[in-house]
Image (cartoon, helix red, strand yellow):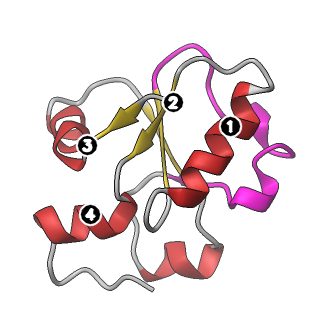
Amino acid sequence: MKEISVEELKEKIDQHEDFQLIDVREEFEYETSNLNGENIPLAQVLIEKDKIRKDKPVVVHCRSGKRSAQAILLLEKEGYTNLANLEGGILAWRDAFDPDMQVY
């Protein structure tokens, strides 16, 4: 499974790269704090897979990297080859860039 660091993600955002960011946490977690990605909870990833692009890079994240890894494994079985897991999830983002971020 391809992984991306929070530093690499920040660089993509800062350089306005064309990619999709998917947050697989629950809606209440997303409402607490998010990285402006699209919220598709893990339990709904296969149901809502049509919202996930196949024609450009996709970074998937959650709180710590475990649920996003599960989501990627599910999606790879559906033919996705353009996915990267955010190492450490939003917790790593908070630790690196935003220590005041509220994380459930």
Sequence-first disc among 2 and 1: 2
Identify the magenta region.
38-57
In this view, 4 is above or below 41: above
- Few, some or many residues within 10 Å of mark 1 (<14, 14–19, 20+): some
Residue 42, given in percent of the width and then of the height, sits at: 70, 58
Q: Nearer the viewer, residue 66 or 24?
A: 66
Sequence-first disc among 4 and 3: 3
Q: CA distance from mark 2 to mark 3?
A: 13 Å
Which residue was labeled with disc 1? 73
Q: Are marks 2 and 1 in contact (CB under 8 Å)?
A: yes
Q: Secondary structure at mark 2?
A: loop
Q: Which mark is residue 1?
A: 2
Q: Secondary structure at mark 1?
A: helix
Query: In the visual, does 61 lie left or right of 77?
Result: left
Q: Secondary structure at mark 4?
A: helix
- Few, some or many residues within 10 Å of mark 4 (<14, 14–19, 20+): some
**Quarter occupied by the C terminus:** bottom left
Q: CA distance from mark 1 to mark 3?
A: 18 Å
Which residue was labeled with disc 4? 92
Which residue was labeled with disc 3? 5
In this view, 94 is above or below 50: below
Query: In the visual, does 13 lie left or right of 67?
Result: left
Tell me the amino acid under the disc marked 1.
Leu
Residue 81, given in percent of the width and then of the height, sits at: 60, 17
2 or 3: mark nearer the eye = 2
Q: CA distance from mark 4 to mark 3?
A: 9 Å
